[in-house]
Amino acid sequence: MNVLIVYAHPSPTSYNAALKDAAIKALLNRGASVKVSDLYAMNFNPVAMMEDTIVPTNPEDVPEDLRLEREKVKWADFIIFQFPMWWTSVPAIMKGWFDRVFAANFAYGPGVYNHGNFKGKKAMLSFTTGGKHLDSYGPKGLKGEMSERLFSIHHEVLYFSGMEVIEPFIVPTGVSVEERRDYLEQMQQRMAELEQQPTIKFPVLEDYVGGQLQTNSLEKVNVLSI
Amino acid sequence: MNVLIVYAHPSPTSYNAALKDAAIKALLNRGASVKVSDLYAMNFNPVAMMEDTIVPTNPEDVPEDLRLEREKVKWADFIIFQFPMWWTSVPAIMKGWFDRVFAANFAYGPGVYNHGNFKGKKAMLSFTTGGKHLDSYGPKGLKGEMSERLFSIHHEVLYFSGMEVIEPFIVPTGVSVEERRDYLEQMQQRMAELEQQPTIKFPVLEDYVGGQLQTNSLEKVNVLSI
């Protein structure tokens, strides 16, 4: 089992770093092979130029940093993204990892969604967010539905590229030190049972005609469940 | 009238550049003062470090690039964001502009939303996206509701910081050359009548208790309208 952890936090003593380290430990303990892209430590360049948005025909034209990241993605059965949620999204350095690494002819093209190029791989978001209980989310929540906030990544990046999406692991950072320790244990448990983690059920491309969901068997609520 | 255009596209001959130039021309024609943050041309650094997330007490500790951007934001009555939509969000260089420029004690804190520090300013997203007719969006759309895709910026960045949000200007890039020209004219018309552009009606913070919308006078559908 090959697991890639894409990690983005500026401080190596952060709680995000502790979650990343807990995941690595649990994965190594069970005999998994682990690679880490520590984007801040790598000084990863997140600023896409036009030529980064498509994989060039000549392999020698691929920048070395993107070649290395794409090799890790190809190698991985599972990809874990560990980050602090900023402005209800990923830090810029991770957005740029998607902008540059997940280029056309690599992550997608000609197929997308259930025909995307990463079919057979699974991905999971693991992140911290402010507050104590995610109590500002929900159908009448100030910040709307968490599933909607994550849809741009879950559905439009990960599933778009063919991956199955594991339910996210979310830690509200306003909790006590004891609860934070408990979350670290939960993370290790998740990694110990990574293949059994439930995934989000998204409709397949064949359920849509002209971009609109046709089937009655899948309600929109399922599309957006976390 | 002071207008700041925050522009992110790697190519100066792009259609996004043409939209930006059309906006500048129309604004100058009507006598507005215009400043532009051309993030690619400026080689703007989008990678936030811990110290960037809060404005330091000592003004001399503020990095020069952030000081300059914050001066422009303070100066502006209107802020226009021009960008190509990538992965249903802004390019990383613009996400990092939010991560670094909109720090605590500048954009927000102690107040947020209708008590945010940018009260009295208005912002508008203007972007290109693939396809011809936005036909993959909607309540049963493959990509969900466009308003939900934009909520993370509209509600959680711009309104969070106190700004009113003008309805977005969206160009599907699959249209014909003639239609593209027509969109450039529409952009100029918008800039000519910028104060009259309709804004999105979001509930005020007082409508929420414990993060949940309490009033019956505002339906959730209004919260998410574009």
Image (spheres, coloured by chain):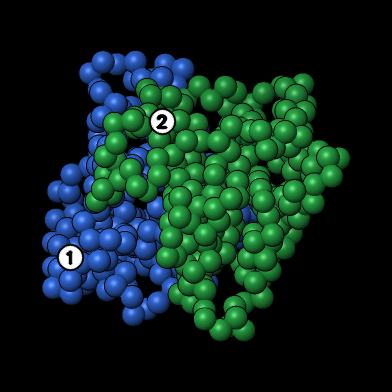
Chain colours: A blue, B green
Protein chain holding label 2 = B
Residue located 40% across and 77% down the image? A11
Q: Quadrant of the N terminus of chain A?
A: bottom left
Q: Nearer the viewer, residue B182 or B13?
A: B182
Residue A2 visible at all: no
**Foreground residue, B113 or B225?**
B113
Location of mark 2 (residue)? B222
What's the residue type where badge 2 is placed? Asn
| Dot 2: element | helix
Residue assigned mark 1? A183
> Would you place residue A226 above or below residue B179 in this image?
below
**Kind of residue sitting beneath label 1:** Tyr
Q: Position of residue A85 (x, y in %)?
A: 38, 58
Residue B152 percent across, percent down from the top left: 44, 46
Figure quadrant of the C terminus of chain A:
top left
C-alpha gap between disc 2 and disc 1: 36 Å
To the question of a shared chain for discs 2 and 1, the answer is no
Q: Quadrant of residue B124?
A: top right
- The subunit carrying tag 1 is A
Which quadrant of the structure image shows residue A127?
bottom left
